[in-house]
Image (spheres, rainbow, N blue to C red):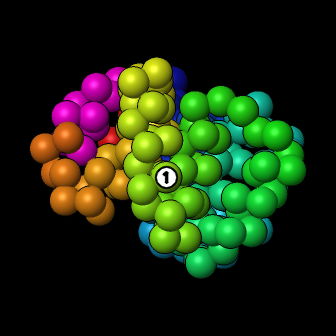
Amino acid sequence: MTVTPSPFIINRYLIPELYPIRSAFYQGNYQHVINEPVDNLTRSDEGQLYKYRARIELGQASTVLAEMEDAGTTGAGFEAVKAYAEYRMGNKEKAMQELEELIQADADDGTVQVIGATMLYGEGRTEEAFELLSKHENNLEA
């Protein structure tokens, strides 16, 4: 008799390592996201993006932007989060210009898609937001 493990058993083979962070973020439990360690994750950059996004949602956009500038973070996802921080700080024109450049260069990046669609929707550009999200591949957030 073969015993099949329950899909509800949490272990590293059945549940992706970012699941707790993503789940907390989607539930709006931003403080939990911030408190979750990400340095030991194989996808620590993605974990760090969720931490930055959570802090932005908690009103810490200017602090996040300053930290990201100091850390010298690079990559499309980090650039999208920087643009979102600018947007949330009220620098909408600058943020939208940065977003447009990101979409042109990296529309296939999942973070660019989600952050971009959020910002486009916020500007009343719903059709463009949906078009950007339609480019996703296996991105549950999109």
Q: Which of 3 and 81 is in front in this view?
A: 81
Q: Nearer the viewer, residue 13 or 96?
A: 96
Q: Position of residue 100 (x, y in %)?
A: 39, 36
Residue at 41% x, 49% y is 96
In the displayed image of the protein, which residue is found farthest to the left?
A: 127
Q: Nearer the viewer, residue 100 or 26?
A: 100
Total numbered labels placed on residues in the image: 1
Residue at 19% x, 59% y is 124
Which part of the image, by quadrant, shows the C terminus?
Answer: top left
Decide: is 28 above or below 14. below
The region drawn magenta spans 129-138
Classify residue 116 by image quadrant: top left
Decide: is 97 above or below 121. above
- For the question of whether residue 138 can be seen, the reply is no
Which residue, given by chain and number where applicable, does mark 1 sit on?
A: 94
Q: Is residue 48 left or right of residue 120?
A: right
Q: Position of residue 98 (x, y in %)?
A: 49, 41
Decide: is 31 above or below 87. below
Residue at 52% x, 31% y is 3
Mark 1 closeness class: few <14, some 14–19, many ≥20 residues within 10 Å: few
In the displayed image of the protein, which residue is found farthest to the front?
A: 93
- For the question of whether residue 82 can be seen, the reply is yes
Residue at 50% x, 64% y is 91
Q: Position of residue 60 (x, y in %)?
A: 66, 74
Helix, strand or loop under label 1: helix
Residue 130 covered by magenta stretch: yes
What amino acid does circle 1 point to? Lys
Residue 122 covered by magenta stretch: no
Q: Position of residue 106 (x, y in %)?
A: 46, 24
Q: Is residue 46 left or right of residue 23?
A: right
